[in-house]
């Protein structure tokens, strides 16, 4: 009889003490006449493709240790489609090959109906950032993203651009006092919003636990590329807002659902991965059936997180405008990490996931930002059905944060900001303008998706210091 020892199992990836003990026990009872080489090959295959062995009475016990599925769990194993669904790639020259390949994997899911890739796309977790996916009665937590309801909000104000120069000190002080960035806590003063009284917070144990943190973080922003900034927006002739075509003072913010959305994403992604088994290269795209209890819970929780993200922007804008004595003439806002029930051109009902993409139905307004020194664009959707009524959510990253940090110094960033006439409070070299694609090229690539209504230029930018 060939006996495998713990060190033999460690060499092939069985590093967990409990898993090794289970394997040794099983092979001593059921694989007495196998050679060591045969056992190593079998165990290696189980680790590589546990879904292949999960239903076997004996090897399924070993496979389960790699799938993190509890005994008796209700899970299904799925194969990919041999013929992927239709995919529209917009501005393909701007998109890295790895993002295209990642999207191709998503198009092979058995629940996939149609997909689109925006010109700002780059590789992400699950769907690429800039990926749009229509599915049949299924929601993919990683197709929505970790920061559920991450969104843009633009307030066009009742002042002209000279206000920026005349009151720059007061604007900077207001940004320091009434915005907060990063993981810890929130603002130093109490915030109120009707979303905190939502009965949905009492619908699951997870949401009950998160209500207190949501209250503390209300009106604050995340880290990374999230920002609150004042600038000037030029509205064009015959804009959809019906405002006079001229330059206005404007406030633009970018943030999401904070700890609430992150915890919802983490919790339901695990359930999806545990219950929907896919080939390893697309396992992060595990979905929840909307008819299942977990699917219904996620949908309810996702929508609450979206409402909460909006509430954070509501408070940011209200606090700053009150502090500076300003009034909003118009507000435009949109999610870009979310899923919506919608209908395709042929009438089929689908779930459209936009992972870093702006909704752009015909007549639907949105904001597409560039970087801390480049333009953001106010747009009106053209409703292109092949692109799933979507547009880019920004310029898109050209460099990873690590690479951006390695290729930019603080002094070089300061010079870049000075040349652009931008004041930065906080921020980091990881978010420097060269870390992003050229917003003008991205906008040019999606002329068939949106019509431009106005052009915003940042002047005083507040970000997290990392």
Image (cartoon, helix red, strand yellow):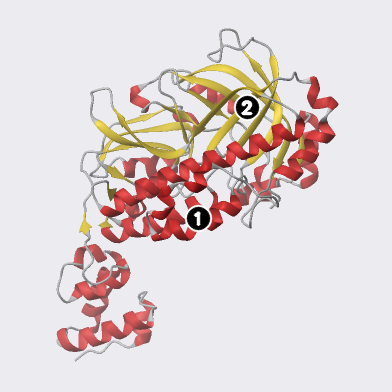
Residue marked by disc 1 = 211
Determine the residue positioned at 20% across, 89% down: 28
Count of marks overlaid on the render: 2
Residue 5, quarter of picture: bottom left
Task: Tell me the number on the disc at residue 263.
Answer: none
Q: Indicate which disc, 2 or 1, sits on the residue closer to the N terminus.
A: 2
In this view, 200 is above or below 362: below
User: x, y percentage for residue 159?
Assistant: 74, 20
In this view, 393 is above or below 64: above
- From the viewer's side, name the closer residue of 402 and 231: 231
Residue 414, quarter of picture: top right
Question: Are the residues flagged by discs 2 and 1 in contact, CB closer than 8 Å?
Answer: no
User: x, y percentage for residue 420?
Assistant: 76, 29
Residue 289 in sight: yes
Residue 128, quarter of picture: top left
- From the viewer's side, name the closer residue of 214 and 450: 214
**Looking at this rendering, what residue extends furthest in the top direction?**
238
Task: Quote the CA–CA distance across marks 2 and 1.
Answer: 28 Å
Mark 2, secondary structure of its residue: strand
Determine the residue positioned at 42% across, 48% down: 199
Residue marked by disc 2 = 155
User: x, y percentage for residue 262?
Assistant: 49, 53
Residue 127 in sight: no
Q: Is residue 356 left or right of residue 132?
A: right
User: x, y percentage for residue 65?
Assistant: 30, 73
Determine the residue positioned at 61% across, 31% down: 370
Mark 1, secondary structure of its residue: helix
């Amino acid at each position: 009889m060939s006996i495998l020892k713990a060190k033999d199992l460690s060499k092939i990836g069985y590093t967990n003490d409990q898993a090794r003990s289970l394997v040794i026990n099983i092979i001593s009872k059921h694989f007495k006449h196998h050679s060591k080489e045969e056992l190593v090959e079998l165990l290696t295959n189980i680790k590589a493709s546990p879904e292949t062995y999960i239903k076997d009475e004996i090897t399924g016990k070993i496979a389960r240790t790699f799938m993190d599925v509890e005994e008796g769990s209700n899970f299904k194993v799925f194969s990919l489609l041999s013929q992927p669904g239709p995919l529209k790639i917009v501005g393909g020259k701007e998109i890295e090959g790895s993002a295209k390949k990642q999207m191709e994997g998503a198009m092979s899911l058995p629940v996939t109906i149609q997909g689109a890739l925006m010109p700002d796309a780059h590789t992400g977790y699950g769907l690429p950032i800039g990926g749009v996916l229509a599915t049949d009665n299924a929601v993919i937590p990683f197709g929505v993203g970790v920061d559920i309801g991450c969104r843009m909000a633009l307030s066009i104000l009742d002042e002209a651009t000279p206000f920026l120069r005349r009151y720059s000190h007061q604007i900077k002080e207001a940004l320091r006092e009434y915005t907060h960035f990063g993981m810890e806590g929130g603002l130093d003063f109490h915030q109120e919003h009707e979303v905190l009284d939502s009965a949905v917070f009492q619908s699951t144990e997870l949401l009950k636990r998160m209500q207190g943190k949501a209250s503390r973080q209300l009106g604050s922003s995340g880290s990374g590329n999230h920002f609150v900034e004042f600038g000037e927006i030029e509205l064009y002739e015959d804009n959809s807002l019906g405002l006079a075509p001229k330059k206005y003072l404007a406030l633009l913010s970018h943030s999401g659902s904070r700890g609430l959305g992150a915890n919802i994403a983490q919790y339901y992604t695990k359930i999806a991965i545990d219950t929907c088994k896919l080939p390893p290269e697309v396992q992060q795209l595990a979905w929840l059936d909307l008819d299942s209890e977990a699917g219904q819970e996620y949908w309810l929780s996702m929508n609450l997180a979206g409402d909460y993200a909006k509430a954070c922007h509501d408070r940011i804008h209200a606090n700053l405008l009150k502090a500076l004595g300003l009034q909003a003439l118009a507000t435009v806002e949109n999610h870009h990490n979310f899923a919506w029930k919608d209908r395709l051109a042929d009438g089929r009902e689908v779930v459209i996931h936009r992972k870093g993409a702006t909704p752009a139905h015909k007549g639907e307004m949105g904001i597409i930002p560039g970087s801390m020194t480049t333009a953001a664009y106010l747009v009106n959707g053209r409703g292109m059905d092949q692109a799933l009524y979507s547009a880019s959510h920004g310029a898109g990253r050209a460099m990873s944060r690590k690479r951006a940090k390695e290729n930019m110094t603080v002094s070089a960033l300061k010079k870049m900001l000075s040349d652009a006439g931008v004041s930065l409070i906080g921020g980091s070299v990881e978010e420097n303008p060269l870390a992003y694609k050229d917003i003008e090229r991205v906008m040019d690539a999606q002329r068939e998706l949106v019509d431009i209504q106005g052009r915003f230029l940042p002047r005083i930018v507040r970000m997290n210091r990392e």
